[in-house]
Image (cartoon, grey):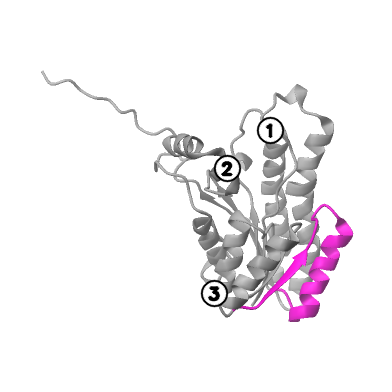
């Protein structure tokens, strides 16, 4: 199999690339950070895998088209894709105070970038009989978070985009699903410090944050033959965050 991962330079994207490689796929790595992509490609090759770094800005329609063309030219076909690139947007800000350009930037990367990727990935997969795509959403794509207008809008849009793509190509052998991670120990959370990680863990029913490798394992499974009857679905990877309200911890005094 040949797999492509956008947003592959770090965090969940890098973990997905490793999971694909460990499963035996040749992996194309896409992101804007060329040096980080080269390091990851070298790592995968050192472990016996086949990897190609394709520096790409997913907001550039022509660059995305060239990305898929290069992958097919290098490996002959494309079977799997994880559209993980995200970015832009704004820090927590009340909606009326969000700069228009910041809102637009969040949608450009996290929503339009996924549209552009699928627009070119799907025809490449159809050329060889089908494939599987997993888009990286978020629990914020299913439940809003105050102050994050651009991010929440992009991820809610991504949920709809995933379902449309799944319906459009289900009968042609292309499956399209999404994963919705909750708090994951990526670079951003790590930079926020131990206190931030502990606070995030305390808010989770499972009482810890997730690891990028746990998301990657779910992505690899959704792309595998074991998930052949699944399309248009979103798999929550959130430690129970959206399941509901945890039970109240009531301590009864002895009589």
Q: Disc 3 vs disc 2: which is toward the camera?
A: 2
Task: State whether residue 156 appears in this view.
Answer: yes
In the image, residue 51 lies at what x, y percent? 67, 74
Element type where label 3 sits in the image: loop
Residue 111, x across and y down, in percent: 75, 48
Q: Where residue 191 is drawn, which disc sits there?
A: 2
Mark 2 residue element? helix
Q: Left or right of 224: which side holds 55?
A: right
Rendered position, 19 above or below 48 = above
Secondary structure state at the residue bearing disc 1: loop
Residue located at (42% from left, 44% from top) = 208
Out of 61 and 175, give the one closest to the viewer: 61
Picture quadrant where residue 149 is located:
top right
Residue 5 makes an appearance in the image: no
Please tell me whether residue 57 belongs to the stretch shown in magenta: yes
* Discs 3/1, front: 1
Report the span colored magenta: 49-78
Of the numbered discs in the image, which one, if any, rests on residue 91? 1
Between tags 1 and 2, which lies in front?
2
Q: Which residue is mark 3?
A: 23
Instruction: Compare residues 234 and 148 and report the one nearer the observer.
Output: 148
Give me the residue at 42% from left, 35% from top: 202
The answer to which of marks 3 and 2 sits earlier in the sequence is: 3
Residue 246 occupies quadrant:
top left
Q: Is residue 73 magenta?
A: yes
Tally of marks:
3
Identify the mark at residue 80; answer none if there is no mark: none
Q: Nearer the viewer, residue 142 or 163?
A: 142
How far apart in space, not on screen, are marks 3 and 2 (Cα)?
A: 30 Å
Position in image of residue 85 (x %, y %): 70, 53
């Amino acid at each position: 199999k040949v797999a492509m991962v956008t947003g592959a330079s770090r965090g969940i994207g890098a973990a997905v690339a490793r999971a694909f490689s460990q499963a035996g796929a040749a992996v194309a790595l896409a992101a804007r950070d060329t040096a980080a992509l080269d390091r990851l490609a070298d790592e995968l090759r050192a472990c016996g895998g086949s990897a190609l770094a394709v520096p790409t800005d997913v907001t550039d329609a022509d660059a995305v088209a060239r990305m898929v063309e290069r992958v097919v030219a290098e490996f002959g076909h494309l079977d799997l894709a994880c559209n993980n690139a995200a970015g832009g947007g704004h820090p927590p800000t009340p909606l009326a105070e969000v700069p228009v350009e910041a809102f637009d930037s969040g949608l450009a990367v996290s929503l339009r970038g996924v549209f552009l990727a699928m627009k070119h990935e799907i025809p490449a997969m159809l050329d060889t009989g089908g494939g599987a795509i997993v888009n990286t959403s978020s629990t914020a794509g299913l439940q809003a978070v105050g102050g994050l207008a651009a991010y929440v809008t992009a991820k809610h849009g991504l949920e709809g985009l995933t379902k449309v793509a799944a319906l459009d190509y289900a009968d042609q052998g292309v499956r399209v699903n999404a994963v919705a991670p909750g708090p994951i120990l990526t670079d951003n959370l790590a930079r926020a410090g131990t206190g931030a990680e502990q606070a995030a863990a305390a808010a989770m029913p499972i009482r810890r944050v997730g690891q990028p490798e746990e998301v990657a394992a779910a992505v690899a499974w959704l792309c595998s033959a074991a998930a052949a009857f699944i399309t248009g679905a979103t798999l929550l990877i959130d430690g129970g965050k959206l399941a509901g309200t945890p039970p109240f911890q009531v301590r009864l005094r002895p009589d």
